[in-house]
Amino acid sequence: MTRIPNCAGHARPLPRLALLLLAAVIVAGCATPRPDPEPTPDPEARPELAELPPEVRASLLLSEARSRPDPDRVRSAIEAVLALDRATSDQLDQAESLWAELPEAERDTQEARLLGARLAAAQRDWTLARERLGADDPDDPTRSPEVYRQGLSLHARLLEQEGQWYQALDTRLRLDGLLVMEPDLHGENQERIWGLLAALRPAQRERVVGNHPPDGDAWVSLFRLLRAADTQDEARQAAGQWRERHPSHPANSLLPDLLESHPLATGRPGDTLVLLPLSGELAELGNAILDGITRAFYAEGTGNGRLIVRDTRGEPDAAAALYRRGVESGVAGIIGPLRRESVHQVAQSDETVPSILLNRTETVANSAQTTLALNPEEDARAVADRAARAGWNHPLVLLPEGNFGDRVATAYRAALAEVDHRPRDVIRVQPTAGELNATIGNALGIPQSESRIRDVARRTGLKLEGDPQVRADVDHLFIAGTASQVRRIVPHIHFHQASHLPMMATAHVYAGRADAGRDADLNGIVFPDAPRVFDQVRLLRDQAGTSDEPLPRFVALGMDAMRLSLHQEAIRDAPHHQLTGGAGAWSLNPFSHEWIREPAWARFEQGEPRRIDLPAGES
């Protein structure tokens, strides 16, 4: 019998029941442990959110945030909606309602402002996004490196939406170094840098050099080298030399694709639909453009399908209906329409094909559509850009009263602002008015100079003789108007002895036919125009009596539209390419979808326009 000691040190026998219990405990201790019992299911427990499809997860978090709208739940719900590839308008509206209900203190940190700005941007309310993002605050405790990076990225997007290409490029150059550990975002940022370089005017591109060392200079250098290369061999040679100087520059990652874009490929073969006003008030322009399109179509050779021409009669509804039917019929590309209202209507189309729209519109939502135009605004921007490159920063502007002058003034001011300049004065004149001489004299500061002369004479008691001087704060003149209007304005500039100031004008200063007798007063005026116009001038000069081509600018526009239509998809993928045509050298702004023209330049000499942008002996 088993015994255990008692407290006196004597052993006593264990009862049978105790012995059995002890054995059971020993056996239980040696057995395999039992698993814990299953927990009682909690009816309010949620499945793991990370395992749910994104749409379900966003809907679940939105529902939860509406029922219990504490800040953390609200922020999680908004983040889930923003993480969706395509949030529905209802989801965005719910997220916006939740955001609006947050206490003001919860919306005021930099992290929260960024979230609200991202939400506004997802709804394409760019003004609200700008307002919510506000200024960067380095002292805000929520400003983590990730918040700063995301804020900088959103800031770049907002600048792109506002058309501030130079500022957007500056932001993306600063952002690029923060994305080294994010390969996908890094690659996307570099592609946008390349696109922004294409969006810049030449004067803006020159400003990058020296202002964004070291990467900015190298970006511009590569862009210029590849733009100048006509063949793939030239592009590869230029890229190889650039790579030797910049072996670790981030743009090296783009080089393989950029080099593959040389030479420019044509788009998919198929029919081209042309929509133009061939009857009605715009018929003359429409037929001139069609002439150019037809010439270029046959010059490009066969293999591009048929050219299908339809008359829009200048009616927006007719143009929109013809455009829609063209898309449904499966044409490969569309050129036109021409009237601004027609272009605006067509640009709203949900279904489209690669298209060259022959006028500007506010927004082009579909990247398959691009806009091409010859208008006063484009000339004004070209003049501002050339003046900036020449170092002329303080213009005096003389514009006729009326709609034409309004359009030129608006575009010119905006173009000057892009290079941080502004006009000294913008003077609106009526060229046929009797007080034109006094108006121009006053604009040039002549009365003020005469007043100073009289004041000195009065103080000194001397009889002074002297010519009044032109104001000293102006370094060039910009004069816009038709040829007949500018002919009336310029003699008054000569009369007030301001001929020493460089004078610039839009293409409207040249009527399209050389007339040395009438245009002698225009000598010295520099203006942009289509190269084909000067080809006609040279032809007429060399072959006296040959009839000139009617509306050569618009014939050139048609020729260029056809060629751009064939190559626009390739240029969209590699926007450093530039296509030189009869109206100028065209490049694509991949953000605004606008074709930007670098025109030819001429100066009136002996009453005739002469090219000033060609090598010696070619003018």
Image (tube, helix red, strand yellow):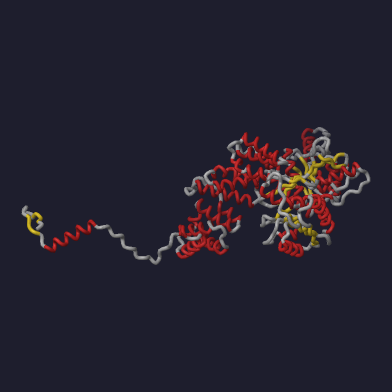
Q: Is residue 364 above or below residue 227?
A: below
* Total labels drawn: 0
Of 127 and 29, the residue lying toward us: 29
Q: Position of residue 416 (x, y in %)?
A: 71, 45
Q: Position of residue 94 (x, y in %)?
A: 53, 63
User: Seen from this angle, which residue lies furthest bottom?
Assistant: 43
Looking at the image, which residue is at 68% across and 37% down? 238
- Quadrant housing the C terminus: top right
Q: Position of residue 511 (x, y in %)?
A: 86, 48
Residue 598 lies in quadrant: top right
Q: Position of residue 276 (x, y in %)?
A: 79, 59
Q: Is residue 155 left or right of residue 70?
A: right
User: Seen from this angle, which residue lies furthest right?
Assistant: 545
Looking at the image, which residue is at 81% across and 37% down? 500
- Quadrant housing the N terminus: bottom left
Residue 93 lies in quadrant: bottom right
Of 449 and 16, the residue lying toward us: 16
Residue 339 seen in render: no
Residue 461 seen in render: yes
Of 186 and 75, the residue lying toward us: 186
Of 119 and 194, the residue lying toward us: 194
